[in-house]
Image (cartoon, coloured by chain):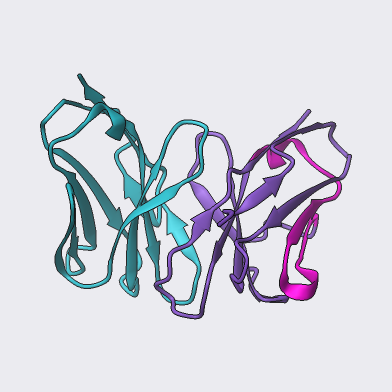
Chain colours: A purple, B cyan
């Protein structure tokens, strides 16, 4: 069974540009999460989808970040316009059902560098 | 005060020894507690979860939870060089939002 996949693995862009990150969860997983790790800091929760609905987006830093999950399958996270402080590793994770204690499986991450 | 605090390390132990990793959290309403292992450049991997006070053992790993002290720990018995990684403590207060600590780097010397 394929795990969580993320694309691209790396992205280098200039300040002010737009970047779109993609996450494909494990097939059949209704829950999809986005996290971010800025260098030297802890992994921070960004938001949680249940199918196509945003369940909790309390961690989104500002309105330059837009996450979507049309059709409840893959998700995209767009940063527009990107700023220097957006650099970091963006992780996606998925879990299967509604039980709070279910394991979240992490993808390999997208390493974003904003110059 | 950080929501989840861990000693950044590095913690260095000889092969075969017990590695003890500690974590404190600030939200008394926290219900679920996790330990993730992250190798350099890789994604976090869940190795233990614990939800009630006491010990939970899984192979060489034992998680310990003390909600009164807001403290959770991970013991790794018979440490192996392959256990060298960053160990992340994570806490959930309900719902699905998970709060991570910054991690403790563990080195197991052969």
Name, please, the residue furthest toward the right. A17
Number of residue marks: 0
Residue B106 rendering spot, x and y as whole percentages: 29, 32
Residue B47 forms part of the magenta stretch: no
Name, please, the residue furthest toward the front. A1
Residue A91 rendering spot, x and y as whole percentages: 60, 49
Name, please, the residue furthest toward the top. B110
- Whether residue B7 is situated above or below residue A55 in the rendered picture: above
User: Foreground: B23 or A110?
Assistant: A110
Residue at left offset 13%, top offset 41%? B77
Residue A76 forms part of the magenta stretch: yes
What quarter of the picture does the N terminus of chain A occupy? bottom right
Residue A71 rendering spot, x and y as whole percentages: 78, 74
Residue B54 lies in what quarter of the image? bottom left
Q: Give the range drawn in magenta.
A: A64-89
Residue A59 lies in what quarter of the image? bottom right
- Residue A14 horizontal side relative to residue B28, left or right: right
Residue B25 rendering spot, x and y as whole percentages: 32, 59
- Residue A89 horizontal side relative to residue B73, left or right: right
Residue at left offset 31%, top offset 45%? B6
What quarter of the picture does the C terminus of chain A occupy? top right
Residue at left offset 75%, top offset 52%? A22
């Amino acid at each position: 069974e394929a795990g969580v996949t993320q694309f691209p693995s790396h992205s280098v862009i200039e300040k002010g540009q737009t970047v779109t990150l993609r996450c494909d969860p494990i097939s059949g997983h209704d829950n999809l999460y986005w996290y971010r790790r800025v260098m030297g800091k802890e992994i921070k929760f960004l938001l949680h989808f249940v199918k196509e609905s945003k369940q909790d987006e309390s961690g989104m830093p500002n309105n330059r970040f837009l996450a979507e999950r049309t059709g409840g399958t893959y998700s995209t996270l767009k940063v527009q316009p990107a700023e220097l402080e957006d650099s970091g590793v963006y992780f996606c994770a998925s879990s299967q059902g509604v039980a709070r204690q279910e394991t979240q499986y992490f993808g390999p991450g997208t390493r974003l560098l904003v110059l | 005060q950080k929501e989840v605090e861990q000693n950044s390390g590095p913690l260095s132990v000889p092969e075969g020894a017990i590695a003890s990793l500690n974590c404190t959290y600030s939200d008394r309403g926290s219900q679920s507690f996790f330990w993730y292992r992250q190798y350099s450049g890789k994604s976090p991997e869940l190795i233990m979860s614990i939800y009630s006070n006491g010990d939970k053992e899984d192979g060489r790993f034992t998680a310990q939870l003390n909600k009164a002290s807001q403290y959770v720990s991970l013991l790794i018995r018979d440490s192996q060089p392959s256990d060298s990684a960053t160990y992340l403590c994570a806490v959930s207060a309900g719902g699905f939002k998970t709060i991570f600590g910054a991690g403790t780097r563990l080195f197991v010397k052969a």
